[in-house]
Amino acid sequence: MDKFDDVPILNHHLKSKLTEFSLKVLLHCQRNSTPIHWNFQGLKSELSDLARSLFIEFSNDIYLNHYDLPAIKDGDLVKRRSDGEYYKVIKTESITFRLNHIPRKTKKDSFPANIPEIRYDKLALKYLKVSAGVSEKTIKNYFDFFEKLNNEKSEFPRTHFEKKSVFITKKTLWDELPEKSKIPSIYLPNPREENGISEIKSIPALSDCLTYFTPKYEVCYQNILLKGEKIKTIIVFDTEADKIQQILQDKVKFGFNLIVLSNSVTPLKNEGISCWNWFREETEILKTL
């Protein structure tokens, strides 16, 4: 157990030493691209706490290490960071862009000037690419969350990412995550079981995300992996145990790592992934440390 003491973790206000130790082991495996199956027997609350912590850890890892500059094209909507004004992007024949100001109905003294020419580097630095109107508070909460988490301020707005994490989990976990309003994430429903529910964004105005959530691996495979999205980690949370073999095979093809979290007296094991099966007596001892 001592080998995991130095694994750095964020300040999660974890409920017990059991959850803290579990988080350190899983992060150690993740940083070494080692798949792992972590099973608690009858400790659903601790497992949910662990999943919530992994959501923050993995989202922060993507935010810090896999951000990308946005692809800006003709007709895109951007928001100026300094004053919140909106502009429509017009591609010119040269390498620059033109920005046409979009007046806001609720703002009488809006600054009306169009911007005849702006280079991409300045556009990416001074403006946010958005898909709809977004409040100043929403964006501020997002940036403030990660600034406080890392004790540093980003030089430019990080709203696009070249890799993501994916949680395969029932929608219950997504619904219960208190931080998702500050972490760009997307829930992809299973069309076979969730009729009438479309894609849900935690921050609707942003076109990209750090983390996907979906209840079925099939949805992840069809809507994320086959569409060319690069995935760093797939976390299977207390579901889809019969799909682990298929996910392990796809792991080789697509290059992601796999973490399985389960809450079962008799977890379904697979030869291709190490299973840490914690008995109730063992977890009770860890809780007291």
Image (cartoon, helix red, strand yellow):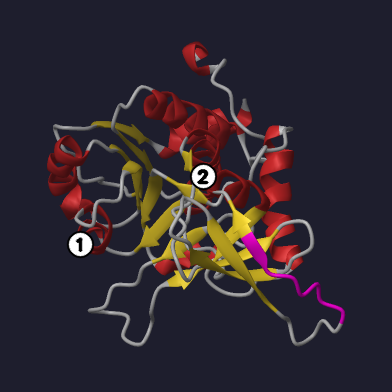
Q: Is residue 132 above or below residue 4?
A: below
> Which residue is located at x 51 percent, y 12 percent?
2
Image spot of residue 274 (x, y percent): 25, 29
Dot 2 crowding, Cα within 10 Å, few <14, some 14–19, many 20+ = many
Number of other residues with Cα within 10 Å of mark 1, as a class: few under 14, some 14 to 19, many 20 or more = few
- Residue 91 point in image, percent of width and height: 47, 63
The percent position of residue 43, horizontal first and vertical second, equals 47, 48
| Nearest to the observer: residue 288 or residue 116 | 116
Using the image as rendered, state which of residue 174 and residue 97 is in the foreground: 97
- The stretch drawn in magenta includes residue 113: yes
**Would you say residue 85 sits in the magenta stretch?**
no
Quarter of the C terminus within the rendering: top right
Residue 239: x and y, percent? 30, 57
Badge 1 is on which residue?
A: 222
Q: Is residue 218 left or right of residue 76?
A: left
The answer to whether residue 89 is left or right of residue 29 is right
Q: Which mark is residue 59?
A: 2
Instruction: Tell me the element at label 1.
Output: helix
- Three-letter amino acid code of the residue under disc 2: Ser
User: Position of 277 compared to 91: left or right?
Assistant: left
Q: Magenta residues: mostly which secondary structure?
A: loop
Residue located 66% across and 43% down the image: 146
Magenta part of the chain? 109-116
Task: Give the answer, above or below, for where 197 lies relative to 249.
Answer: below
SS assignment at label 2: helix
For the residues marked 2 and 1, what is the alpha-carbon distance in whole angstroms?
A: 22 Å
Identify residue type, mark 1: Gln
Q: Is residue 139 left or right of residue 74?
A: right
Q: Is residue 179 visible?
A: no
